[in-house]
Amino acid sequence: MSAKPLKIVGASSRTAYEIAPVRAINAPDRRRIVFPELTEAYEAAYQGRDPSRAQIVRRWAQYFDGWITSEIDADAVADALEHWAATPVRRFVGKDESGAMLYRELDLPKPGSINKAKAVLSAVLTFAKNRRMMPKGWTNPCRDVPGLTMNNERVRFLDDGERKRLLAVCRLSTWNRLYLLVLMAITTGARKSELLRLRYADIDMERATAYVRLSKNDEPRMLPLTPAVLEEIRRFGKPKHRDALLFARVGDPDRPFTINRAWSTAVHDANLTDFKFHDLRHTCASYLAQNGASLLDVAATLGHKQLDVTRRYSHLTIDSKRAIVNRVMGEIA
């Protein structure tokens, strides 16, 4: 077989390569980008669902207003975080007669809030590095700033009697899906926002799973469903369409139900004190830890990225660890 003759292409032809410089000589150096400009680019590219992130990013832009991003060091980050931790949280309460905004001053931010602020800054700086905005050899200064000890975690969970009372009153709620919502929260450990965003299309009845498309950590995850949950879902029959929300408003399958009144009534009727919806998530984790699940198992169930967050339940695993050690090592003497 003879080789095909070469096709001669002129410089003006469409098929000829047109070589252009990667960056014009007089273009500004991206590695000298000012930090507030970086935060604007980050916010434009961010596709997560964290509602507080934008406010945190804008606050960092105020701290480092005028700074060249690559010149932000660990000392500057630590100083900003120290000021952040010493500044009381403010809540917007309205405007005065002149239109000026009014705020109520609350307590100081918790260690978890400060650690989250540092994590958001780290994400912004990593964003810059991944897009070649930082000089060679640059390292993220947030790595050299230790996080605060999170010793204020709340671990409130239902005992057996409280759980039975709560589920009983949920069955009698004026909102007929409160029992299913609470049952799923206890048995899956999912967050309220994750459950309220579930659609029928996310439920696989054969595999007994629910697919959370995007969690708080911006990652999808799968929830195992118990037989009791599956039975309750079947009880409601088929939805109007597959994309309808599982916990939709009455008459509006595309908007989640507002559960505040139904939930507060159930908590009151079940005679629960100091109990919030998020504590159902703690209840799931605590039940797992008390019945032999490892901290890795608990972290995987709750969707924790860092095991340090799960360590708050470590004291609950003592009895199960003791039983395992006695079963395996009990006859050694």
Image (spheres, rainbow, N blue to C red):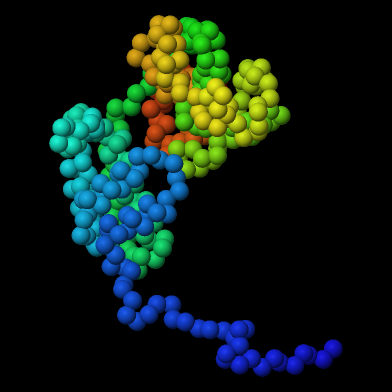
Relative side of 299 to 96, left or right = right
Residue 103, given in percent of the width and then of the height, sits at 19, 32
Q: Nearer the viewer, residue 328 or 57?
A: 57
- Position of residue 7 relative to residue 127, above or below, is below
Q: Nearer the viewer, residue 209 or 96?
A: 96
Residue 187, given in percent of the width and then of the height, sits at 54, 22
Measuring 30% from the left and 59% from the top, which residue is drawn there?
37
**Quarter of the image holding residue 242?**
top right
Q: Nearer the viewer, residue 300 or 264?
A: 264
Relative side of 60 to 301, left or right = left
- Position of residue 318 relative to residue 69, above or below, is above
| Residue 84 seen by the camera | yes
Determine the residue located farthest toward the right in the rendered image.
1
Measuring 18% from the left and 30% from the top, which residue is drawn there?
105
Residue 100, given in percent of the width and then of the height, sits at 17, 37
Measuring 26% from the left and 49% from the top, which residue is drawn there?
60
Determine the residue located farthest toward the left in the rendered image.
98
- Position of residue 47 relative to residue 23, above or below, is above
| Residue 137 seen by the camera | no
Residue 5, given in percent of the width and then of the height, sits at 75, 93
Measuring 55% from the left and 32% from the top, which residue is drawn there?
254
| Quarter in which the N terminus is drawn | bottom right
Relative side of 162 to 120, left or right = right
Determine the residue located farthest toward the front in the rendered image.
97
